[in-house]
Image: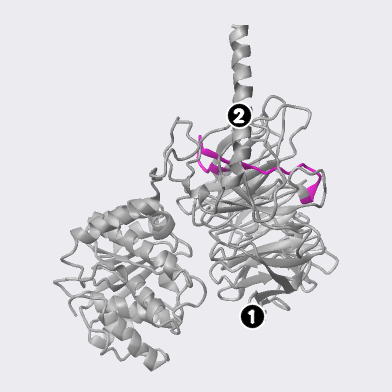
């Protein structure tokens, strides 16, 4: 048995060396599209000593374990910034909204931007410096927000292309403490995923802690506050909003609060951890928030998550393996790929063996017994804070950036490295040890492929109702309702509530002579699942007989969480039918400046849901897409997500034409909007339907 074991060990060593030799030669074969052909191997892959070769900017390194190519992105010794070049932090987004620009920090305290595709250095930013807490706008790829160094009483927006600077929020004389001089997150916070809600800790000019506030950027209002002195607590280590915008999370050491999530009105709180640790917050597939961290004080040092909306804690994996330790950074910024978080590890004992998690960057699924995919070794020798990898992910989990001194024992010789990722989140759990596609014809099945195939089937199966197969020219049937409509219930979130779309519809209907009444159930950020869980909708349906119930999903739900979107939409439709009402699906729109990426996905998802449930669609999203394509100067948005007053009118007009089988052109109602624009929008609405 000992001989067999020795032979096995020797075989493994020879195999490992062979892999290294082969990959050294393969370094010359990497290309820009190589990674998209790789099929990642799932599981806790044994540690292999990585081969760290000198790498020039723009050149590739083939990872010894995954087969992914790592690209050196910056070269601080030969281009600005001529100190180190680093991504800011794992909890901050380095990529802008369309992945075209990368934000880079230098030791001098200045901020720089690079072209994300070519790696070309662009320029140093004018305005923000040092710890200015830079945050990209979630929709506009040219806009970044920042604060004065270590906080001040204003948040600025900067157009990185035109260098135009504006005040996005002025907090002077607007806070509940007269001595307030600083608002900031203390370097680690971010706003909600849609950029609407921002959480800050407030301090005096001498950094005396005062309290927490929540700012609604859309309405430019400080909507809630919480005073430290009242509850006997001091300064948090950091503060952030959750991705959903439903919670502000503050992290303390040495008091009973530890890391606590407070509801947006501070009436509820959930303790997430007994102290402050490296952590981040991510979105789950049900669009709830997850807090991810490590508990070093517990046996086996578990990495875990807590779902904020339920308080449920889920074990992910143990970090103490045979007497070893590891430090962690987490990046939950892949809001468009909910249910996953990026992990980078460092700080392992150098005099002990290393195991599957050490000195790596990997993706982990946010569920019990999660799938884990190793992405790369980061090659950074731990020489203090600046050499920590701080790996950060973009919003759709297709790109990763990390910092590394690349095998050099240097505290400052640090540059940025980039990994383009294949689609791994859709891979089914398997025991096969396959690390890359076996031939060029291997196809990775992705959710996008599934949606497109399903959408083709839907278009074919409903061709009697659809005049044009091209999604943006699609035409829809209007509601075929035998009896007059008396009561309509809208169920949704701010995409229905802003500028009161139901009330606008009511005015249009009354102008026609239809004495319809409208009702609304709306909660900011709500998705279909929230309305299923809460009793408000069920109680409304029990106590009031509605003719029509309009069902509106979350803004990201039909784009990036299609499975739950269809499942929960079907449940709601059945619930409405059980109460003798007609369900209607409200097709919402793409995010501003994301028309080319999102509009078709929204259309396909709604078509699939409609086919599954036989529920008609009000095609507001198609109308928004036509405006984006044909009339880009007509502004239907008030921010990256929400409708402007004009956008609300357009939505209400689309509903009016659908529900009352009427043309849009004769509508006279004008809530002080440009009449020429209204005529254009009326023409678009009249073109959306078959039976005008």
According to the picture, the residue beneath numbered tag 2 turns out to be 18
Mark 2 neighbour density, 10 Å: few (under 14) some (14–19) many (20 or more): few
Question: Looking at this view, is 510 or 131 the one in front?
Answer: 131
Callout count:
2
Using residue 253 as the reference point, say whether residue 45 is left or right of it. left
Question: Looking at this view, is 176 or 522 the one in front?
Answer: 522
According to the picture, the residue beneath numbered tag 1 turns out to be 162
Using residue 78 as the reference point, say whether residue 558 is left or right of it. left
Using residue 414 as the reference point, say whether residue 477 is left or right of it. left
Dot in front, 1 or 2: 2
Q: Position of residue 251 (x, y in %)?
A: 70, 51
Question: Looking at this view, is 299 or 621 the one in front?
Answer: 621
Q: Earlier in the sequence, mark 1 or mark 2?
A: 2
Give yes or no for residue 350 being in the magenta stretch. no
Q: Which residues are magenta?
A: 363-386
Q: For residue 48, what is the image quadrant?
A: top right
> Residue 199 shows which numbered tag?
none
The residue at 42%/65% (across/down) is 598
């Amino acid at each position: 048995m000992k001989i067999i074991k020795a032979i096995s060990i020797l075989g493994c060593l020879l195999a490992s060396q062979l892999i290294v030799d082969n990959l050294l030669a393969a370094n010359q074969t990497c290309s820009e599209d190589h990674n998209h052909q790789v099929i990642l191997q799932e599981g806790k892959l044994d540690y292999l000593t990585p081969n760290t070769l000198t790498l020039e900017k723009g050149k590739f390194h083939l990872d010894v374990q995954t087969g992914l190519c790592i690209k050196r992105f910056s070269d601080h010794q030969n281009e600005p910034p001529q100190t180190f070049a680093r991504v800011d932090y794992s909890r901050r987004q380095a990529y802008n909204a369309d992945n075209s620009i990368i934000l880079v920090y230098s030791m001098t305290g200045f901020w720089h931007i690079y072209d994300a595709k070519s790696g070309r250095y662009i320029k140093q930013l004018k305005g923000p410096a040092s710890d200015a807490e830079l945050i990209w706008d979630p929709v506009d790829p040219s806009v970044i927000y920042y604060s004065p160094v270590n906080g001040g009483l204003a948040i600025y927006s900067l157009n990185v292309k035109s260098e135009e600077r504006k005040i996005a929020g002025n907090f002077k004389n607007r806070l509940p403490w007269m001595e307030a001089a600083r608002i900031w997150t203390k370097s680690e916070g971010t706003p909600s995923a849609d950029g609407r809600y921002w959480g800050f800790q407030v301090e005096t000019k001498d950094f005396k802690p005062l309290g927490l506030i929540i700012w609604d950027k859309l309405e430019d209002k400080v909507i809630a506050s919480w005073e430290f002195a009242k509850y006997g607590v001091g300064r948090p280590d950091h503060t952030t909003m959750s991705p959903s915008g439903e919670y502000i999370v503050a992290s303390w050491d040495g008091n009973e609060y530890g890391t606590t999530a407070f509801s947006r009105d501070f009436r509820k709180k959930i303790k997430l951890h007994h102290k402050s640790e490296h952590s981040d917050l991510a979105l789950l597939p049900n669009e709830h928030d997850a807090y991810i961290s490590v508990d070093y004080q517990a046996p086996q040092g578990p990495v875990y998550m807590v779902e904020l909306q339920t308080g449920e804690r889920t074990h992910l994996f143990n970090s103490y393996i045979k007497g070893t330790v590891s430090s962690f950074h987490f990046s939950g910024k892949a809001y468009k790929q909910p249910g996953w978080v990026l992990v980078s590890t460092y700080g392992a004992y150098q005099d002990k063996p290393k195991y599957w998690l050490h000195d790596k960057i990997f993706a982990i699924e946010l569920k019990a017994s999660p799938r884990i995919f190793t992405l790369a070794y980061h090659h950074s020798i731990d020489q203090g804070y600046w050499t920590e990898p701080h790996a950060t992910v973009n919003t759709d989990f297709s790109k990763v950036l990390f910092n590394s001194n690349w095998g050099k024992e240097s505290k400052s010789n640090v540059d940025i490295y980039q990994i383009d990722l294949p689609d791994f989140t859709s891979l089914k759990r398997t025991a096969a040890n396959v690390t890359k596609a076996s031939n060029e014809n291997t196809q990775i099945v992705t959710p996008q492929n599934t949606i497109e195939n399903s959408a083709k089937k839907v278009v074919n199966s409903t061709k009697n109702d659809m005049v044009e197969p091209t999604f943006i020219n699609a035409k829809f049937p209007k509601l075929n309702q035998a009896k007059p409509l008396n009561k309509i219930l809208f169920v949704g979130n701010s995409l229905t509530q802003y500028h009161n779309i139901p009330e606008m519809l009511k005015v249009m209907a009354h102008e026609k002579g239809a004495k319809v009444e409208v009702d609304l159930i709306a909660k900011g950020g709500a998705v279909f699942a929230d309305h299923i869980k809460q009793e408000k909708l069920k109680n409304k349906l029990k106590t009031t007989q509605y003719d029509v119930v309009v069902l509106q999903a979350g803004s990201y739900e039909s784009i990036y969480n299609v499975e739950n979107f269809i499942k929960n939409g079907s449940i709601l439709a059945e619930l409405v039918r059980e109460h003798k009402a007609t369900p209607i699906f409200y097709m919402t729109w793409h995010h501003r400046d994301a028309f080319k990426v999102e509009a078709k996905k929204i259309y396909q998802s709604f078509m699939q849901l409609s086919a599954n449930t036989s529920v008609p669609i009000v095609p507001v999203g198609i109308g928004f897409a036509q405006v984006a394509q044909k009339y880009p100067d007509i502004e239907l948005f008030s921010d990256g997500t929400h409708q402007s007053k004009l956008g609300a009118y357009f939505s209400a007009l689309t509903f009016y034409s659908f529900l009352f089988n009427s043309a849009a052109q004769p509508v006279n109602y004008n809530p002080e909007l440009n009449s020429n624009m209204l005529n254009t929008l009326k023409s678009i609405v009249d073109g959306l339907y078959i039976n005008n």
